[in-house]
Image (spheres, rainbow, N blue to C red):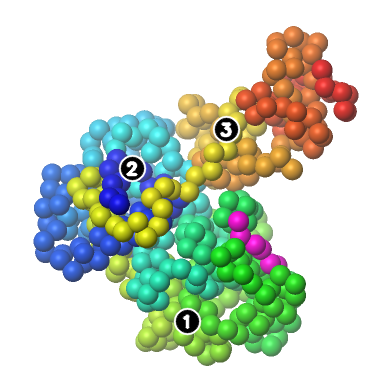
Amino acid sequence: MVVDLEKRDVVTIEDLSNGEIEAVFSLADEMSQTMAEQSSVCQGKIMASLFFEPSTRTRLSFEAAMNRLGGRVISVMEIGQTSLAKGESIADMARVVGSYADIIVIRHPWEGAARVVADYADVPVINAGDGGHEHPTQTLCDLYTIKKERKTLEGLKIALWGDLKYGRTVHSLAYALARFGATMHFRPRRGLEMPEHVMRKLTTEYAGRLERYNAVKDVEKDGLFPLDAVYVTPSGPHQLANIPAVGIQMELKTDVDAIYVTRLQKERLEPAGEAGESERSYPVVDKKLLREKGFRETIVMHPLPRVDELAYEMDADPRSMYFKQAARGVPIRMALMSLLLGARKVELPESKGPSFAHHRDYPVYDRDTGVRCRNRNCVSRQGTEARYMKHKFHIVASEPLTLRCIYCEHEIHPRYIASSKWHQGIVEKKRYYSADSFMLARIRPENLIIFDSEAAAEAQGFKPGKRGKAP
Ligand code: CP
């Protein structure tokens, strides 16, 4: 099969199929072995490098990659250097920058910002990290490293460690690992567990199975590896189902292929409450931990930068991979950009995986009935963007009714529903019902009206309906 990614965006790791990821790796292998021959692949192309949050690795490796491909780079590194500081919207900026450059790479503190840029720019857009949402090209570097060191991506056992709530790299990585049939062990700092929307995707869209283990104190006392949750893919039938507590301990005494460490994302913590305890009790990976039986062959990964969660004594250990992960960012990003710019295509055997990306066809809800994303960091909640953006959700579940914001993917559970078909504009027929009543099943998605509160329903002229009696 020929893998052609021309004009595509990479906003989430789900924008690339397994086969396309393999194609990026194959081209990265070729380019890293023939670096000197790549200097005209993107000649005449311009990359816009928009980094509105600090970065060392991602920005410099993207810029190095475009320079190595013979293209040029235009860049801004602070919102204060741009007209966003004057109140310009991200959509307007995207349209304009898309007319100056052939490809846009953007890092932004708001979750969903890269999606907006991709919606409005006429050129390929790469998400270089949007708040605590995703960081898909870091995942490409991570998977590439796992593949190089373990010789496969299939059926591995990976421990994800640290701040799983705000660590965007672990969100993208978890989706990708699930697709390659991994078993994941989550070891979060208490209070910084994987977000609900990530767990839902893993357990429904990727058909994974979740086992929770809560006896953290007992395990810590024994010096074992404590964890809060285990995710098992259907491709790895498991003995944990019947006796989870004992099973998970046993599981950790057997070989873990990689431990993926993340720092506390201090800049994203809730202003009240999350900071103090998180810093005091953050789990540390050091030589002592790596002496445990289950970790003897384990490779140690970290997207970097590190703070205190990964001991410097690990740097000389041959199992440590984090500087290799960072170095591999250049060939990976060279390969990805040359594919998105249509400068290269890749021929792959069909056996390398399906060529379609992972997307569920969920119904979209975008009526203006006052339903809002509750994530304060979502792009849809920001004043500059509210002027033109519609709040938009995927309806991902009905019991309970669950809407997923299409920008940041946080979920909400609105409480009231109605049908546009029942009232057809006639005021007397405007009735609303509880979202957990059987009325929900009677309403087709295209007719569904959703409210956050009774007050919102009544403000739009709806009156409470009798339970069990549809108009
Ligand atoms: N891994 C990563 O995103 O590093 P930077 O923040 O330095 O780009």
At 70% from the left edge and 86% from the top edge, which residue is drawn?
A: 221
Q: Quadrant of residue 313?
A: bottom left
Residue 182 appears in the figure: yes
Image position, residue 446 (x, y; %): 62, 25
Q: The C terminus is located in which quarter? A: top right
Dots 3 and 1: beta carbons under 8 Å?
no
Relative to 161, say whether 365 is above or below: above
Q: Is residue 299 above or below residue 208?
A: below
As shown in the figure, which amino acid type bears the numbered disc 1?
Thr
**Three-letter amino acid code of the residue under disc 2:** Arg
Of the pair 393 and 442, the residue shown nearer to us: 442
Q: Which mark is residue 298?
A: 1
The reply to whether residue 189 is in sight is no
The residue most toward the front is: 350
Mark 1 and mark 2: Cα distance apart in space? 35 Å
Which picture quadrant has residue 318?
A: bottom left
Q: Position of residue 293 (x, y in %)?
A: 56, 89
SS category of the residue bearing label 2? loop
Lower position in the chain sequence, tag 1 or tag 2: 2
Q: Is mark 1 within 8 Å of ligand 1?
A: no
Whichever of callouts 3 and 2 sits on the residue coming sooner in the sequence is: 2
User: Mark 3 highlights which residue?
Assistant: 364
Q: Which residues are magenta?
A: 207-213
Could you classify mark 3 by the number of other residues whose Cα lies within 10 Å: few (under 14), some (14-19), or many (20 or more)?
Answer: some
What residue appears at the point 75 percent right and 72 percent down from the top-left corner?
242
**Residue 63 located left or right of residue 155:** left
Based on the picture, tell me whether residue 453 belongs to the magenta stretch: no
Which residue is the site of mark 2? Answer: 8
Q: Is residue 388 left or right of residue 39?
A: right
